[in-house]
Amino acid sequence: MNLYWMILLHLLYDFHWQGQFIGEYKGKYPFIMFIHSLTYGMIVGLPYIIVKQDVWSVFLIAVLVVSHYFIDTLKNKWIGVTGEDMWLVYIDQFLHLVVLVSVYLVINGMS
């Protein structure tokens, strides 16, 4: 799977496809954040599983889910302090990009 598709799926789901309910409550309830992270991992990782069909696909989804959960949780915690630190969204997206590129490079170097 091409890295560009992973980034496109990331951007589409993390902003548009997550829905209003998830967008509103993921920063307030850890379970909703987990659901957001799990669906994110599946949407971004599923095409890779379909194309590659190897054991590293499980690794990909696990890393995407766990990293997305922690990055978004920290972002929401820091933004929640003042409500004015929206610039943290750029750091959040940069960290997600680093994870996507790193996982892509590791998995494609292993197969």
Image: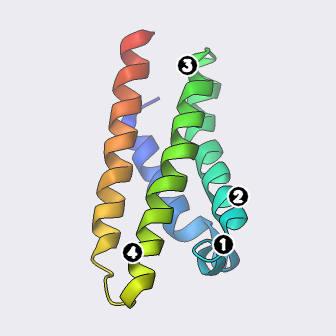
- Answer yes or no: do the residues labelled 4 and 1 have beta carbons within 8 Å? no
Give how far across and how far down residue 7 sits, in percent: 40, 48
Mark 2 neighbour class, 10 Å CA radius: few under 14, some 14 to 19, many 20 or more: some
Above or below 111: residue 5 = below
Above or below 66: residue 48 = above
Query: Which of the pair 3/69 is nearer the observer?
Result: 69
- Answer yes or no: do the residues labelled 3 and 1 have beta carbons within 8 Å? no
What is the secondary structure assignment of the residue under circle 4? helix
C-alpha gap between disc 2 and disc 1: 8 Å
Query: Which of the pair 89/43 is nearer the observer?
Result: 89
Question: N-terminal of the two: label 4 or label 2?
Answer: 2
C-alpha gap between disc 4 and disc 1: 18 Å
Disc 4 versus disc 1: nearer the observer: 4
Question: N-terminal of the two: label 3 or label 1?
Answer: 1
Question: N-terminal of the two: label 4 or label 1?
Answer: 1
Disc 4 versus disc 2: nearer the observer: 4
Mark number displayed over residue 78: 4
Q: Residue furthest top?
A: 111
Q: Image quarter for residue 36?
A: bottom right
Please name the amino acid that badge 1 sits on: Ile
Q: Which residue is mark 2?
A: 35
What is the secondary structure assignment of the residue under circle 3? helix
C-alpha gap between disc 4 and disc 3: 33 Å
Please name the amino acid that badge 2 sits on: Ile
C-alpha gap between disc 4 and disc 2: 21 Å
- Answer yes or no: do the residues labelled 4 and 2 have beta carbons within 8 Å? no
